[in-house]
Amino acid sequence: MKKFFAIVLSVAMVMGLLTGCSGASAGKKEKLTIWINGSDSYISPQENEMAQDKWYITQAIKRFEEANPGVEIELVVQADGETAHQAFKADSLAGTAPDIGNFWTGQNIYALEDVILDITKYIPAEDKEALVGWDAVTSPATGAILGYPTADNQVCYFLYNRAIINECGLDFDNNPPKTTEEFDAAMQIIKDHGYQPLAQDEGFPWFGCYIGNYWWVSESGYPRIISDCEGTTKFADDPGFINAFNYYKSTLDNGFLNADCLTCADSFNKFCQGKVAMMPQESSVVGDAEAALGAENIGLLLPPDLPTAKTTGGTIGGPGQCFVVSKSCKNPELAVKFISFMDSKEEMLNFLKVQSKVPTRKDITAADLGYAEGSNSAKLVEMAAKTIYWVDNSLYPSVSGDFYDLLPSVLAGKMTVEEFGALLDADVAAAK
């Protein structure tokens, strides 16, 4: 279990008088507390190097407060998105949960339905129409809408340094590797030229979630994955599961993935310093990579397909983050008003000036964002049409924890993929 800690930041002072319909009673201060993930969400890697008052999320909160006199919002930054879910559950049971939480969608919030408020009746009709991703926050068991999809439709890919790729005699722009055999050949060429082909911090299996899960679902399909979670079939003999994570492990065995991947925490910094050719990544880092190396030196590559894949040319993605409201929130109408503000067209455009992501609003186009044809940002919009929803967000709670915790052990060679699958099968059996 990762170490859990939070950095508390008070980002507003209460203004004097209530004007109009502000969400606060006249002469009375209304306070909301919100948890935001420290990475992979509203705070970019580049912003983590800045003073907190320069962050987009800090400035957005200030804009909401200014528009709603008498409202104060306290921002709490969760350093670990995975453990934030368990912490929210524990705090809810203790009566100390925040009013609003920023969590991963799908099964991650379905498992918290007993402490998350059904906000269906508070959601404006125009929000339901304007946003995509409601299926990722709607409980399949009860139909309750447990949150709002956040501002980005995330897309996974390999981020590559075009200068290194071209120096190695490769042309990923016009002749990208489309199969794992072609990908291995390209990685070997890069390695032979003295560069680290791939890097990622896999103490938490980001590569496994971003790309490995695509290889799995592209062969097995969602019906098989769900039946594995239900115990009707087994992870341990799921061919797609076995093939995907054996190939994932082979990237380290062949020296393509950085040897210190299980202990390092600075792979993205090394990429931005020009020391790494490629990284499995998601859409939030494109702007930072372009700022470090120049947009002309950054490219995006869809995952290559395994020879056993039944679905090809796709990737993992979709609305992977959401806002939820705690059942203990004393003013859920105000909480939803803030979330609706964050997902408004004007505010989403403000956010997308800071991070190059695919918007979840249907009324925002690549042209609205000023994305030049052929730019990486425009490519993300194109890639979004090819995404398969996050597999790890779809795993049942009975197995998702061990999936995250044990997959690095497969990479390290401490267990086989089949042994990993058998442990997940044991989790399923224990939950019945």
Image (tube, rainbow, N blue to C red):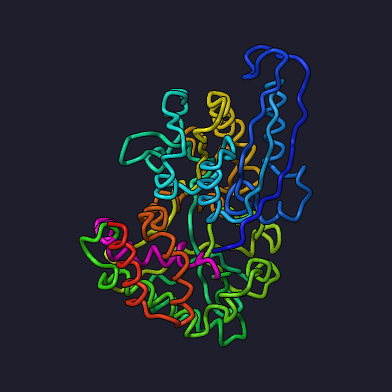
Question: Secondary structure of the magenta portion, mostly?
Answer: helix
Residue at image location 46% in from the left, 37% down from the top: 116
Report x, y in % for residue 198.
55, 75
Q: Nearer the viewer, residue 153 or 340?
A: 340
Which portion, as a residue range, is magenta?
203-228
Q: Nearer the viewer, residue 51 or 369?
A: 51
Residue at image location 71% in from the left, 14% down from the top: 18
Residue located farthest toward the bottom when viewing the structure as drawn: 192
Q: Nearer the viewer, residue 185 or 34?
A: 34
- On screen, residue 145 versus residue 196, left or right, reads left
| Picture quadrant of residue 310 | bottom left
Q: Quadrant of the C terminus?
A: bottom left
Residue located farthest toward the left when viewing the structure as drawn: 232
In magenta stretch: residue 217: yes
Residue located farthest toward the front when viewing the structure as drawn: 94
- On screen, residue 45 versus residue 143, left or right, reads right
Report x, y in % for residue 280.
52, 66
Vertical placement of 220 versus 334: above or below?
below
Report x, y in % for residue 5.
65, 54
